[in-house]
Amino acid sequence: MELYEILVLVLSFVVLLGIGVPVAWTLGISGVLTILLSIETITALTTMAQRFVTSLDSFTLLAIPFFILAGQLMNKGGIATRLIEFAKNVVGALPGGLAHINVVAAMLFGAIAGSSVAAASAIGSIMGPRMEKEGYTKEFGAAINISASTTGLIIPPSNTLIVYSLASGGTSIAALFVAGYLPGILVGLSLMAVAAVWTLRKNFPVGERGTFKELIQSFMSAFPSLFLLVVVIGGIIAGIFTATEAAAIAVVYTLVLGYYYNEITMNNLPDILLGAVKTTSIVMLLIATSVSMSWVMSFESIPQAISNGILSLSDSPVVILLLINMILLFVGMFMDMTPAVLIFTPIFLPIVTELGMDPVHFGIMMVLNLCIGICTPPVGTLLFVGVSVAGTTIPKVIKPLLPLFVAMIIALLLVTFWPALSLWLPQLFGLA
């Protein structure tokens, strides 16, 4: 019976997604069709509706709309320009200087905003024309921007890590946030290494070395933005406030910062709020339908069947972890990060914990894995945003993206099989 239910779930999901049904509705409909195999129609529909509502009844989830609003405020608040100038004075003189500036600026902006899409839009719109003017191809600039923007989902604060905390049954958000720093920096350095080799081969120009005075001036200009990281993460680690309260503080801080920079006014505030509401609505609908489908899978004992199947393939932790990574890489090509985390965490977390893997370590591995998926066709959200900002096409961007994919996969393998990369900082701060 479990096999029949798995077939109904998978086939309905693939067919609905294939004919263009939005992911959120696909998840909900597939869940309903599966649960109808075991429960009467009225009971099944009532139960699913109840699950939709109760899945959002969480204080932790309040952090998501706050961080989304903070990201919208940062996107309009002139923060990207100041971070780019700071990054230019730090890494601009290295081979492929503009590419490195793009990576570092995306890491900093993504870490502050917690949004890869916001980072790709804000940094890409500024760095794209600048790189093209200096002789870089439009496609290479787009590839760097797309891949670098993923670091904002690993380096805290990250909405995806908050979602993982919910899906994993309450893994410490503070531990997850701190654990994301070293893997996020590793990804950034890996991308910079590829960019350096690529630019040397293509003979792209090297930027001018800034003076120490310019470095200090750019740092002081960017310092108010960078200080938000100290406020948010420092407050969470110190136990001064929760992640949800930190998100609310981030909104107030970025709003004040936007007015201080004279980039946000009362006239554009309604558009910022409306954009945040739209994004929040999409994310919350995805969470509701994803949690509901996850519940259906648990009710039908599908995770246990998949877990037993995977564990029966091999006794080697290395083989099992590689298999899980391969499955997640494939899933990431077709599914957005939020539903992927909510659906597959209950399936894979029991397997890896049985192997002795820490839930914090697995969370970082899973998010980093799915970050690669949002850069890949056919439904990579970040890929579409980056290509749109650059004014190019997906087929043209794929070639320069391939070596960057390889770098990210190498970083993923290091994170997977070197637990200290994820756990050293949480253990240092007494969080894990």
Image: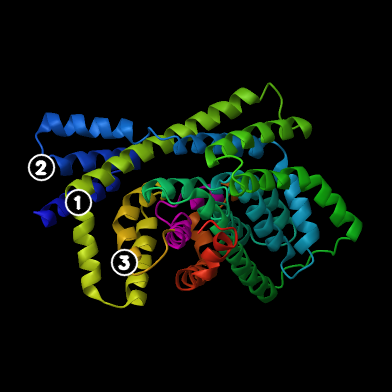
Foreground residue among 155 and 130: 155
Foreground residue among 428 and 401: 428
Residues shaded magenta: 360-386
Q: Of tags 2 and 3, which is closer to the observer?
A: 3
Q: Mark 3 is on which residue type?
A: Glu
Identify residue for label 1.
11
The reply to whether residue 79 is in sight is: yes
Q: Quadrant of residue 429?
A: bottom right
Give me the residue at 37% from left, 68% from top.
Answer: 356
Task: Label 2: state its secondary structure.
Answer: loop
Q: Residue 292, how many percent across, how many down?
A: 28, 40
Q: Quadrant of residue 271?
A: top right
* 3D distance between C-alphas at marks 2 and 3: 30 Å
Q: Residue 106, how many percent across, how many down?
A: 64, 53
Q: Which mark is residue 247?
A: none
The reply to whether residue 26 is in sight is: no
Q: Quadrant of residue 199?
A: bottom right
Give me the residue at 66% from left, 76% from top.
Answer: 201
Q: Tell me which numbered mark, 1 or 2, is placed earlier along the sequence.
A: 1
The local crowd at label 2, few if under 14, some if 14 to 19, many if 20 or more residues have their Cα within 10 Å, is: few
Identify residue for label 2.
38
Based on the picture, tell me whether residue 272 belongs to the magenta stretch: no
* 3D distance between C-alphas at marks 1 and 2: 17 Å
Magenta segment, principal secondary structure?
A: helix
Task: Label 1: state its secondary structure.
Answer: helix
Foreground residue among 26 and 291: 291
Q: Mark 2 is on which residue type?
A: Ser
Q: Tell me which numbered mark, 3 or 1, is placed earlier along the sequence.
A: 1
Q: Which mark is residue 354?
A: 3
Based on the picture, tell me whether residue 365 belongs to the magenta stretch: yes
Task: Label 3: state its secondary structure.
Answer: helix
